[in-house]
Amino acid sequence: MENNIHSYDDYPSVLHAEDIQIILRMGRRKTYEFLSDPPFHVNRVGKLIKVSKGVFINWLEGK
């Protein structure tokens, strides 16, 4: 999987599992395992996982 995104600004305001997979450089299975009980708020729409970019970045940067 190639990552052509160089800045958080390049991501949409609502992240999907695939975005988090790229940012954290994790495999697909590990990403979904991580998102099954994440340390930040997620929204589930059916099987889709949606995460606010701001919430995710704050968690990632330790804020």
Image: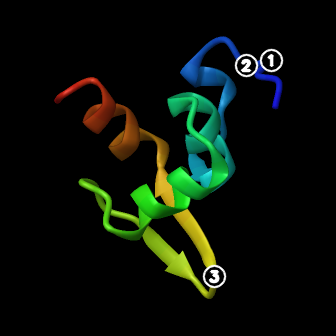
Label 1: state its secondary structure: loop
Q: Residue at x 53, y 52 (%)?
A: 31
Q: Is residue 12 left or right of residue 34?
A: right
Vertical comparison of 15 with 45: above or below: above
Tell me whether circle 1 and circle 2 mark residues in contact (CB < 8 Å). yes
Q: Which residue is mark 1?
A: 4
Disc on res. 5: 2
Vertical comparison of 12 with 44: above or below: above
Q: Amino acid at mark 2?
A: Ile
Q: CA distance from mark 1 to mark 2?
A: 4 Å
Q: Residue at x 31, y 67 (%)?
A: 37
**How was this image coloured?**
rainbow
Disc on res. 47: 3
Tell me whether circle 3 and circle 1 mark residues in contact (CB < 8 Å). no
Expressed as whole percent of the image width and height from the top left, the position of residue 58 reads: 28, 33
Q: Residue at x 76, y 22 (%)?
A: 3
- Quarter residue 62 falls in: top left
Nearer to me, 40 or 53: 40
Q: Amino acid at mark 3?
A: Lys
